[in-house]
Each structure stands twice: as C-alpha cells, then as structure tokens.
Image: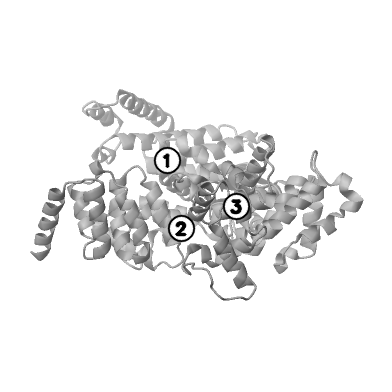
Amino acid sequence: MWADNASKIDMLSYEPYAELIFELAISERMNPVTIGLLGNWGSGKSTILNLIENKINSCSDKGNIVSIFINAWMFEGYDDAKTALMEVILRAIEENKSISQNLGDKFKKLRDRVDWIRLGGLVLKGIPMMLSLSMGNPLPLLLESIKEIDWKDQKELEKLQNAILKMKDLIKESGQDNVVENIRKFREEFEQLINDSKIDNLIIIIDDLDRCNPDRIVETLEAIKLFLSVKKTTFIIAMDEDVIRYSIKRKYPHIEKDDIDISKDYLEKIIQLPIRIPELSDLEVKNYMLLLICEMFLKESKLDELLTILKEKNIFVKGEIINQNDILSILDLEQSEWDCFKNNMKREDFELQLDVFSRISDIIAATLKGNPRQAKRFLNTFYVRKKLSEIQKLNLDLSLLAKLMVIEYINIDLFRELYKWQLENDGYALALQEIEEEVLKEESGDNQHDNEIDQNSPWLKPIMKQWIKVEPTNLYNYDLRQYFYLAKESIKEKNISSLNLTADERKWVNELCSEELNDTFLEKKVEEFKVNNEIDHPKVVKGIIAKYQHDRRKKLRVLIFLYKHFPDLRKTLEEEIKKMKINEVTLPEITRIITLKNVNAEGYQAIKKHFLEEKKLSNELWEKIESSFNKSKKG
C-alpha cells in the first residue's frame, strides 16, 4: 500500500525540476523572488518540494541558507492567515539557535507588530467602516461606540473589547497607533532581522495552499507580498493554478472588460517565476505504476539501484517504456533474490503482479489523465480488495480483478450494467457475450456484423473495445459474484467526491452551481461551458447532479439551461428532472419545465406526462400555469 501523500523517492524523474528550482532559490542575483510550482491536484508538487528541501539541507557549501517548510493548511483554524504565517516564520527563525542567539529583543518587537496587525483586523471586522476611518487614535471612540451596537453574541463583544484594550497597551509600548505604519515598520524590521542574523538566504517553502478555503489562499499570498518578501528571502509556493485563480476571482469580482483578467494580473504580481509541472504522458503513467509495484516489494537500497540504472540508461529522458523483462534483468534475481525483497515478500507474487499490471497498464494509463496520485489510489484499491479476498479465502484471479477494476474506474455506468447482467444469471454476464464476440471478430479482421448490436452502444467506444481485448477475455464464462461483492460500494450511486473530476471539471461544477449567477449570467456560463472542447461535458453534468442530490430544486435550474444547449444529454437530463418529488414541484419549478416546450416538444411532453400521470400532480394546476405562461409569451 502507498500513503496518499508526497513520496520521498523520485519515481517520476522529477529531479531536474527540483534541481532547477533549487538553483533559482539560492541565486543571489534572483533574490528576493517568489517561485510558483504549478500543477494540478495529485501531480507530484509535494514530492518535488521534498526533493528541494533535501537539496537545501545538504548544501553546506552554498553559504548560510535556512529553509522553513510550511503546510498552509495549518492556517485554516486561524482568524487571520496573514499574521499566522508571519508568526510561523518568526518562530522558526527564533528556534534556530545558531542564528537567533544575538538578536535579543528584536523578536518581541516584531511579534508585537504582528499582534497589532492581527488585532487591528479583528477590530475592523467588528465595527462599522466609518469608525475605522476615524482620524487620530480611534480606540476611546471605539470602546464607547461598540456599547451602542446591539450585539447578539456576547462572546464576540467580549472578544472585540479585549482586542481593543490589548491594542491600547501595544500603542503605549510602541507609540504608534496606525496600522499602515506598523506594516511598513514590520517590513523594515523583518529585513533588518534577516541581515542581523547573518542568513544568506531564507527559503520558505509553502505546500497545500490550494487545499485552503479561498479567503485563506488570498490572505497568505497577500502576507507574502505585503510583509515578508524582502531582501535575502525566497518563497517557493506549490499550487494548483486553477484553484488559486478561482479564489482570487471570488475575492475580487470580475471587471466587465474583456481584456482584464484580475486573477492573471494578481498572480503575476505575486509569482515572479512560474514553473509548471506537465501532466504525465500515458507512457509515463505506465512506467510509474510498475515502479510503484517495485517500491512495494523491493528493499529501499535495491529500488534506488533500479532507479539509478534506469536513469543512467536515459529511459525517462528518451520516453521509453519500462517493461517487466527490463526490471527483472536489472535486478538479476537469480543472483540476488535473497537481497532484493522486503520481509514476507515473495518473488512469484512480484512477477505475477508485474505481469498483471503490464497487461492493463495501457488502458488504465489512458484514464488517469497524467495524475500520479490517481495511479496510487487505483493500486491501493486493488490491494485492499486482494487482501480482503485473502482474509475471506476467496479464490480470485488477480488479472480478472484488475480488469473489472478498470471498467469500474473508466465507466461506472457500464460497470453497474455489468453487475445487473451477472445478477440476472447467477453471476454470469451472458449479455456481454455478443458484445465481446463482435469486438474480437473485428480484431481478427472480420468486419461482418452478424449480431444485432447498436453500433452507437457505449460498449463499442474505442476505450471499451480496448478493455474487452485485455486478457482475460470471454468474461461471460466467469462467475463474477465475488468480484462484485468486493466492489459493492461502487454499485450504488456515488457522490461528487468519488467522481474523479479534474481541477477544471470541479471548477465548472462550482461555477455552474453558483447561486450568485442570475438566469442571464447562468445561460452565458452554460454557453461558455458548451464551447469548451477540452472538458468532459457528461462528467461535469454528473458532478452537478451529485452536488445537488439533496436539493433538486436548485439542481433543476441548472439542468434546464443544460437541456437547452446539450441535445445529446437530454435523455439523461429528463431522467434527472423526473426524479423530483411531488412536493418539490411547485409553481416556479413547473414554470421552468414549461420553458422546455419550445426546445424539445417531445421531451417536454414526456416530462409533463410523468408528473401528471405517475406522480399524480394536479393537471388543473399545470394547465393553469402553462396557459398563463403562454399568454405572457404572446404579450
């Protein structure tokens, strides 16, 4: 099994990226600089950060370089991510005794300024804006004014009063009562602290920023720009660019000019050097899956030796496939089997699983969209089911288990259809026989279509034909019950988190489901969605359906607009609309459904008939609303 986090072993050949960023980070000429390591969720950003940190920690000949590794997710529970980040960095410097011993009370001074900035933000959140603009020292006025406000939460009132009183104490000590002045002074004193500490370069590595909520993301970026980006500092920030841009757009609404992209301009001001991790090719995903098998079985020293030899042969640079024979040849098991494997690992199991995944790697790699984390998750699920079968003494064919998992992964609807077929015939999916024979006959060069199979069937799409051809074939001869028993959580409908949506697809689900869009802007957004040919439209529609599984009224609004613009999805959308309960279909919902009359009269009549005849909705109510709607259209 593999942990769903950063790997400490470079099986993706990301070493060149780590080396490049490391050299940029320690370059005196580039300093100060903020480097953005950009890649989608699960693309391997954290692995590269680990490689960079290891390089920094081992570069004793490069001067006095200090690195701080920060997980941005830790700021989620704080009122203010800006000051939380400032505190973490100050604490890390202070805890490094080799550089902090001669800095005296400089840390206290900076911490006081951090407190001032945090408390100032807290106060301004709790009072009317007019008071925040008061000239001079506003604190006496604030203390009087908050007593006049009708506070529903007594704890919030006490929190605000304590903050103001603490600010009062800080003003006495510092002699400054201006937030802007404290920000300016913090930058100056922080830069002086770095100089006095004799640090040549303070490298701050920030991971998991894209897991935070949008406000935290923007606050962290602003803290870097406003407070911390001074001489002798380098920031390396790993981020999913789409998530960051979405957060910026939420914080700073769009300006109605086609030539202005606030999120793009904002990021360019923060990130001086963007480094993008490309998606893995299908071939690279196949190689990665085989290396993950090697990692599970081999001792670390033997795995390092294998990776070193593969790199020396330029396998990764040339884009060559790693096959089972290459791996076995390098390991030379006849001579060194005793020294290769981890405890309890067996050579026959190792070779069997290399063989299994070599055969399915083509098709599974094509569905993983270049994402190494998804490769880990697929393999983890495989090994969970393998272990469960062993505990329950089930006699599984691992090749068949892997093949069924592939269809479960690439097309959950066909997986469920296969489940129904085997359910009808005591475990044997006999309905698959005609489809398999059709595909295998085509493979042999016989293009005669003797079977009455719809050539537009999803079973005959290229990726499914490829799946059918993977050994073992003739699945209708196998009792599949125990395999579906192990996959019973997938037989039921899944929620949005289980749909394996890409970052772009998740973004479209969120944007199309935004309650901030009125109908005019929602229609415009659906039109933009329609012309985006890089998106899997049916998959996004599934995401919308899953997101609104418990709120069908909100879902209906989006489905109506999708129905108008996607003729090929209308049958699916009709079925979803029909799932609405009788108490959910009131005047606004009926009115929306009636708008489909002029889009697709046949589909509209089918929906209407369903609600009137099967759901027993009032025919009189429907006709009354339809009549009123028709009159308004004529008017």
| Quarter of the picture holding the N terminus | top right
Q: Position of residue 463 (x, y in %)?
A: 56, 64
Residue lying at 57% horizontally and 41% vertically, measured from the top left: 485
What residue does disc 3 label? 404
Q: Residues within 10 Å of mark 3 (few under 14, many from 20)?
A: some
Q: CA distance from mark 1 to mark 2?
A: 40 Å
Amino acid bearing label 1 = Asn
- Number of marks in picture: 3
| Quarter of the picture holding the C terminus | bottom left
Amino acid bearing label 3 = Leu
Q: Earlier in the sequence, mark 1 or mark 2?
A: 1
What residue does disc 2 label? 504
Q: Is residue 393 above or below residue 440?
A: above
* Nearest to viewer (mark 1 / mark 2): 2
Amino acid bearing label 2 = Asp
Q: Position of residue 51 (x, y in %)?
A: 68, 50
Q: CA distance from mark 3 to mark 1?
A: 62 Å
Q: In terms of image quadrants, where is residue 35?
A: bottom right
Q: Which mark is residue 428?
A: none
Residue lying at 9% horizontally and 65% vertically, measured from the top left: 634
Residue lying at 30% horizontally and 52% vertically, measured from the top left: 577
SS category of the residue bearing label 3:
helix
Q: Position of residue 349 (x, y in %)?
A: 77, 47
In the drawing, does residue 600 fall left or right of residue 325? left
Q: Position of residue 276 (x, y in %)?
A: 56, 61
- Give whichever of 189, 454 is nearer the camera: 454
Q: Which mark is residue 182?
A: 1
- Give whichever of 504, 251 is nearer the camera: 504
Q: Earlier in the sequence, mark 3 or mark 1?
A: 1
Q: Residues within 10 Å of mark 1 (few under 14, many from 20)?
A: some
